[in-house]
Amino acid sequence: MPAGFFRVCLVVVAAIVNHPLLFPRENTTLQESDKEIIQKLKKHEENLRIEQLRLEQEIARRDAEANMNLEGKGKEDKLPWDFWSTISMVIFLLIEIWRQDFQDGHLQEPNNEEDDMSLWGNIFQAVSLPNKTALSTFYERFIRSTTNDAARTREFVEGFADDLLEALRSVCNRDTDMEVDDSVGVGSMYENWRVNKPLVCDLLVPFAPPEPYHFRSEIWDSVKSSPEDKQGYGKVKVCRPDEEAKGCICDKTKLGEDMLCLLHSKSSETKLNSDMEVLLCSKNTQYLDTDQVMKWFQIAITKAWNKISHKYEFDVTFSHLDAPGALKIRFRSGKFITLNLTPVVQYDDSDVYFISHFPNSGLLNDFSSSTYWLLSFTVYERRFLKEMAKKLPENSCHLSCLQILAFLHGKQSTLTGQSGLTNYHLKTVLLHLLLARPAPNWSFEKLDARLREMLKYLEKSLHEKKLYHFMIGNRSIPESVRLPESFLVAEPLNLFRQFVLHRSIYKKTMDNFYEMLKNASVLINEYTLHVPADHTDVTTKP
């Protein structure tokens, strides 16, 4: 009996010495600490094995002595020895399993998402956002003074873009080159919530192929082979006249010799231009290539500007070559205006467009295949905001909230770099809340409450990694917006779905988000107190 008790005590003592909680867990996020702890565990494990061997030898010696002393005794006296041996082995196995689980679950992944989420939640509880008075003062003194020239900027840019596109049409071959339509203003400048400078105007430029070619749209839900990460994208196929001819009955029915189609006579037939396909399509395919279209558009814009440059007293250059028409207009005074002309393809007869390059797309939107075009619903989003403005109070705060949030996000991106969060995500949050909250809740007196609600909604979406596209799969959109039915009944599109795969970008996004919250009061107070007297833009022609 004493020997069995001694064996149990010895195993318990060994377990206590080897207990993982005896080692310090501070700074477990550092790789050096992980290695040090693992080395200690291995050392203690080796010590435990040595102690176990010594214990087994001691037990064997004592068992031999006990067997000699117990010869002739009854079978009842041997049962306690077997009982204590079994208990000792069970305890040892349980402790070893516990140690392995602790090591695998806590030491191998000290930076798991649950720990990060807990940390982020604690940070949010400690954040102090600006009060209503500070927000109102900031809006009146900074944002209004920043955007007071937005209307003049839009007017000037639209006039210049019309002149430039007209020159582009004149330098293009009407029989073999693309047909370019008038530009369409979209984005924050045309939705009246742009705040961060420079005040950039985004203009979509629809184009179509020359006859007898036509475009055929293929969106993600109609292409079975479309990858899952391309939901919200589509392809544009350049079709020849003999492919899916449509529109005129002469293409479908053989007319008699004495019958003539007034729309399509033999003399109006155009020869196929294989050079056009080679120039704009991906290699060995009939699908439009975003990079090829960008090169074509940049060359066309350059030719158009060279034709009309003598009429203007300013210079026009490409601000960067990663976008089709990112232009910078620089005046002699040194001030400048920027605009983005982006070639797009109209989806069927709707105001949805296939866009080749989406500005300010953040770190997540990468175009791994140049034949996939992103679907843009900006025209419908602008229409929805106009429809909602008719129902909201006269001095509503919905755009003010978005402006303040976009300002904070822009300044934080300048400080800590770009993350997976974009201004489009911020606008999507506002669009969802506009449908969810009654119109009276958007009065300007409730600016602080609505801003906090937007931040809460955004935080919840980031934690859940779910922010659904407002226009895709949302049957609550008013009929007055006139969104095509196919998009209303489509499966909802999660704009944050790539956070699941890109954990490093997700962590950077969350860190930037909470850093933005911590800096919100400082930034707003700083820009409220130090607004320059001449905080305006010169947007008229010199």
Image (cartoon, rainbow, N blue to C red):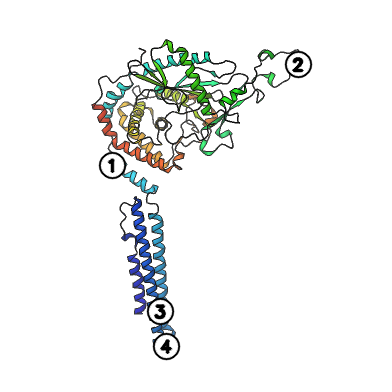
Q: Earlier in the sequence, mark 4 or mark 2?
A: 4
Q: Quadrant of residue 528?
A: top left
Question: What is the spatial separation of the Cα atoms under label 4 and label 2, in whole angstroms?
Answer: 121 Å
Q: Which residue is mark 3?
A: 60
- For mark 4, give the secondary structure: loop
Q: Local crowd at mark 2 within 10 Å, few (<14), some, or many (≥20)?
A: few
Question: What is the spatial separation of the Cα atoms under label 2 and label 1, in whole angstroms?
Answer: 82 Å
Q: Which residue is mark 1?
A: 126
| Label 4 close to label 3 by CB (< 8 Å) | no
Quadrant occupied by the C terminus: top left
- For mark 3, give the secondary structure: helix
Question: What is the spatial separation of the Cα atoms under label 1 and label 4, in whole angstroms?
Answer: 74 Å
Q: Local crowd at mark 1 within 10 Å, few (<14), some, or many (≥20)?
A: few
Q: Earlier in the sequence, mark 4 or mark 3?
A: 3
Q: Position of residue 438 (x, y in %)?
A: 38, 30
Q: Earlier in the sequence, mark 2 or mark 1?
A: 1
Q: Position of residue 64 (x, y in %)?
A: 41, 83
210 sits to left or right of 394:
right
| Label 1 close to label 4 by CB (< 8 Å) | no
Numbered label attached to residue 155: none
- For mark 1, give the secondary structure: helix
Residue closest to the eye, 34 or 315:
315
Q: Position of residue 191 (x, y in %)?
A: 40, 23
Q: Which residue is mark 4?
A: 71
Residue type, label 2: Gly
Question: What is the spatial separation of the Cα atoms under label 3 and label 2, in whole angstroms?
Answer: 110 Å
Q: Is residue 438 above or below residue 161?
A: below
Mark in front: 1 vs 3: 3
Numbered label attached to residue 256: 2
Residue type, label 3: Ala
| Label 4 close to label 2 by CB (< 8 Å) | no
